Every structure is written in structure tokens, then in C-alpha cells.
């Protein structure tokens, strides 16, 4: 973020940080250094319905220079007339639910220390989950968590070593098969309804920027235990085996 701040300053651009997920890390004395440079931003998004743990619909933007909100000021003759002190003139929305009360309550009830506990717990649990994935030969950790989000994918143990040693063409082919497998796995797990991970697409350097479909896990629930995480990985292994999702990979391995 320091580097982006330097570039935006050099070009005279507005520097906005989308910290919708990570913003509340600032409440953690232990980990706030991970957001170093955010203090240089002109504006920052924080979603209270993510790591401030309030219900959906409480996104906010904080501005270093509050006057900047004047850029979107709007008036009408029947509402927020010129000179009105109604803050509604400074937003794009009109009437809205009283979500600010939930944010206010969270700050009072959970408070800085409570948020620090939740944030530290999420970051540390994600680090533990990453180690668990790395130690399991059915999976490949795709991104180490910087905060409490990580991505990984299922790889059939039979082809894991082959993938590391593969030529570019072979690696492309194996990754296409793995992409299909991981998409099917994520859907099957969701449909079972016992546990859920989301999925996304990355273009990692490790695979020459090929599109890789990965599972995405967010560790934010303080009630999630190590056992639950271990059971979830086992459930994924069982789904792949039970539905024979790795059939084409096994055939490929057997042919060579
Ligand atoms: C970095 C980031 N920005 C923005 C969003 C959008 O969030 P929402 O539509 O819930 O406000 C997300 C959602 O995950 C996000 O991770």
C-alpha cells in the first residue's frame, strides 16, 4: 500500500483502498502492521457486514477529507433542499435502513478489544488451516493467507508429483482436468449442505498464468474448531472418491 500511495501521490490521483474485508484488522494491535500504508489513503471502504460482524447491508467509506463527499451532493425541492443539514444530500441512496445503529452497537458491545480477539482468531486459524492443507497430500494450497482468507484445491495424490514435474503442455491439460474436478467438488459439497467453501479463479505464476479454479475459505467464525476444518477436508476427499470426480485424472495417471 505504501508503494501505491507513492504512485498515486506522484500522479496526483485519488487513492482509494478497498478494505471491505481486511479493514477491521486495524483493530488488532498484533496485526495492524499488515495494513501499513492504508493511513495514506484518501478514502477507505470497510464493510461492517464482514469483519465487524453485523448483518448484511452495512458498507461504509471513510474519507480523510470529509469535504470530498460534496462531490456527489444532490438536492431536490421536496427533500434535502439547499442549505439543509440532512446528511442524505451526501449519499447516492435516499431512504435507508438504520444500519448505522448496528455498527454503533457493535463498536460499543464487541468493542475494540472484542474485534481484536475476533481478528486475531481469524488470522491465526487461517494460518493453522493452511498448514493442515499443506500437510494433506490430497490438496494444494494456492495462496497463503495474508489475513483470514486462503485458497486451495483438490489434487489427486496420484498426479500431484507429476504436476510439479510436468511440461507446460502436460501441466495445462492436468490443470484443465483439475479445474473441472474442483468446480464439481464445490457444487457437490454445497448441495450436500453440511459445509461450504466458495470458489474463485486465479492466474498464478506457478502455472504460467493459466486460469486455475480454486476453493476459497474464510476463517471468521469463532466457533470453527480445528476438528471442523479437518472434517471438512475429509468430506471433500470423500465426495471426490464417492462421486468418482477424479476418474479422468486416474485414467490419465494409469495410461502413463
Ligand atoms: C475486497 C472486497 N470489496 C468489495 C466486496 C463487495 O462486498 P459487498 O457487496 O458485500 O459490499 C467484497 C466482497 O467480498 C470484497 O471482498
Image (spheres, rainbow, N blue to C red):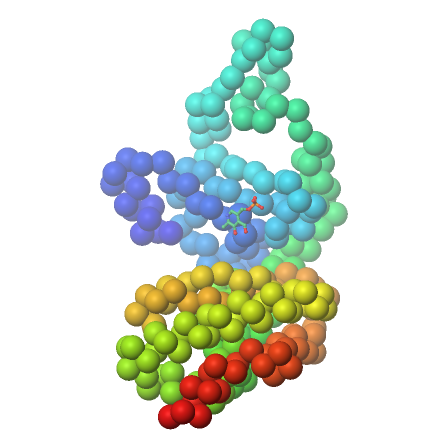
In percent of the image, x 33 and y 86: which residue is there? 165
In percent of the image, x 32 and y 84: which residue is there? 166
Locate the C terminus and report the quarter of the image it occupies: bottom left
Percent from the top left, x then y, of residue 20? Answer: 53, 48
Q: How many marks?
A: 0
Q: Quadrant of residue 113?
A: bottom right
In percent of the image, x 64 and y 81: which residue is there? 242
For the question of whether residue 161 can be seen, the reply is no
Whether residue 102 is situated above or below residue 1 in the rendered picture: above
Q: Residue furthest left?
A: 10
191 or 3: nearer the eye?
Answer: 191
Percent from the top left, x then y, of residue 146? Answer: 48, 64
Percent from the top left, x then y, of residue 254? Answer: 44, 92
Whether residue 144 is situated above or below residue 43 in the rendered picture: below
219 or 242: nearer the eye?
Answer: 242
Q: Quadrant of residue 176?
A: bottom left
Q: Residue furthest top?
A: 77
Side of 38 where 24 appears, left or right: right
250 or 25: nearer the eye?
Answer: 250
For the question of whether residue 71 can be seen, the reply is yes
Percent from the top left, x then y, of residue 44? Answer: 48, 42
In percent of the image, x 48 and y 34: which residue is there? 63
Amino acid at each position: 500500500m505504501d508503494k501505491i500511495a507513492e504512485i498515486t501521490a506522484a500522479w496526483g490521483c485519488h487513492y482509494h483502498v478497498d478494505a471491505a474485508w481486511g479493514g477491521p484488522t486495524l483493530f488488532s494491535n498484533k496485526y495492524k502492521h499488515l495494513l501499513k500504508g492504508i493511513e495514506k489513503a484518501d478514502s477507505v471502504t470497510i464493510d461492517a457486514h464482514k469483519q465487524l460482524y453485523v448483518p448484511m447491508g452495512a458498507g461504509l467509506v471513510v474519507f480523510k477529507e470529509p469535504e470530498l463527499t460534496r462531490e456527489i451532493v444532490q438536492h431536490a425541492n421536496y427533500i434535502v433542499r439547499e442549505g439543509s443539514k440532512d446528511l442524505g444530500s451526501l449519499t447516492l441512496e435516499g431512504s435507508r435502513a438504520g444500519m448505522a445503529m448496528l455498527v454503533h452497537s457493535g463498536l460499543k458491545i464487541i468493542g475494540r478489544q472484542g474485534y481484536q480477539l475476533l481478528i486475531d482468531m481469524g488470522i491465526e486459524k487461517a494460518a493453522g488451516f493452511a498448514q493442515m492443507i499443506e500437510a494433506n497430500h490430497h490438496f494444494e494450497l494456492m495462496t497463503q493467507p495474508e489475513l483470514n482468507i486462503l485458497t486451495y484445491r483438490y489434487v489427486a495424490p496420484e498426479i500431484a508429483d507429476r504436476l510439479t514435474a510436468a511440461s507446460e503442455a502436460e501441466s495445462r491439460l492436468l490443470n484443465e482436468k483439475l479445474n473441472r474436478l474442483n468446480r464439481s467438488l464445490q457444487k457437490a459439497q454445497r448441495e450436500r449442505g453440511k459445509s461450504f467453501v466458495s470458489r474463485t479463479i486465479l492466474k498464478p505464476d506457478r502455472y504460467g498464468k493459466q486460469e486455475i479454479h480454486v476453493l476459497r475459505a474464510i476463517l471468521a467464525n469463532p466457533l470453527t474448531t480445528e476438528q471442523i476444518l479437518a472434517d471438512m477436508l475429509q468430506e471433500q476427499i470423500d465426495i471426490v472418491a464417492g462421486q468418482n470426480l477424479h476418474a479422468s485424472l486416474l485414467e490419465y495417471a494409469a495410461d502413463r
